[in-house]
Image (spheres, grey):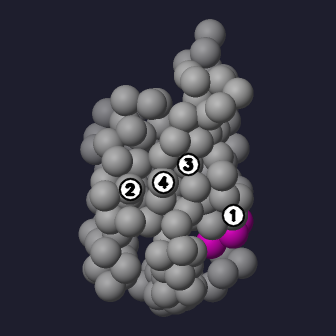
């Protein structure tokens, strides 16, 4: 690497610009579902396991409550989820899918294959890339905690 400060040598820029391209592609793919990419991530978490706390969803998505709450309010307004205070602990807000939110799951089944087609890589390659990014993410979070 001749110039360590050259833009094209920056891992951060490769990840950032890739995320911009991913968001642009997801915007097109998710349009029929009426979801933004962050809303889609919340729905993925709930489709995997319904009835979760806001903090539980935030942990899964690496989002704080201040970022997550407006997303959840919008999903509630759209009729996809309900939010209600826990009867055991009023500090906790429980998120549940509505029947409409559950029904959207069937439409979302096409999203992964659309994204694989757009990326033009085989699923095994993408799984390997995902695992590598998870390792990088874990190392960075561990470093940031110090």
Q: Is residue 5 magenta?
A: no
SS category of the residue bearing label 2: helix
Dot 3: element = strand
Please identify the quarter of the rendering in which residue 138 is found: top right
Query: Dot 3 surroundings within 10 Å: few (below 14), some, or many (20 or more)?
Result: many
> Residue 44 lies in what quarter of the image?
bottom right
Is residue 67 shown above or below 61? above
Label whose residue precedes the other's in the sequence (2 or 3): 2
Residue displayed at 32% across by 33% down:
5
Please report contact status of discs 2 and 3: CB closer than 8 Å, yes or no.
no
In the rendered image, residue 137, in percent from the top left (x then y), is placed at 60, 39
Magenta region: 126-130
Task: Tell me whether circle 4 and circle 2 mark residues in contact (CB < 8 Å).
Answer: yes
The residue labelled by disc 4 is 82
Label the magenta part by its dominant secondary structure.
Answer: helix
- Front-lying residue, 8 or 38: 38
The answer to whether 15 appears left or right of 34 in the picture is: right
- Looking at the rendered image, the quarter that the C terminus falls into is top right
Residue identified by numbered label 3: 95
Choose the circle earlier in sequence order: 1 or 3: 1
Q: How far is mark 2 from mark 1, CA to CA?
A: 18 Å
Instruction: Tell me if residue 37 comes above or below residue 28 in the rendering.
Output: above
Q: Counting residues from the N terminus, which is met first, the one under dot 3 or under dot 4?
A: 4
Look at the numbered discs 3 and 4 and tell me whether their residues touch, using CB distance below 8 Å: yes
């Amino acid at each position: 690497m001749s110039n360590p400060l050259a833009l094209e040598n920056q891992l951060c820029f490769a990840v950032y610009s890739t995320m911009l391209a991913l968001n642009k592609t997801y915007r097109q793919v998710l349009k029929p579902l009426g979801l933004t990419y962050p809303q889609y991530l919340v729905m993925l978490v709930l489709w995997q396991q319904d009835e979760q706390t806001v903090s539980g969803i935030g942990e899964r998505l690496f989002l704080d409550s201040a970022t997550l709450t407006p997303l959840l309010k919008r999903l509630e307004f759209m009729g996809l989820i309900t939010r209600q205070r826990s009867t055991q602990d009023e500090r906790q807000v429980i998120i549940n899918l509505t029947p409409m939110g559950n029904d959207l799951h069937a439409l979302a089944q096409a999203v992964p294959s659309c994204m694989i087609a757009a990326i033009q890589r085989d699923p095994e390659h993408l799984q390997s890339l995902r695992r590598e990014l998870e390792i990088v993410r874990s190392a960075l979070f561990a470093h940031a905690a110090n």
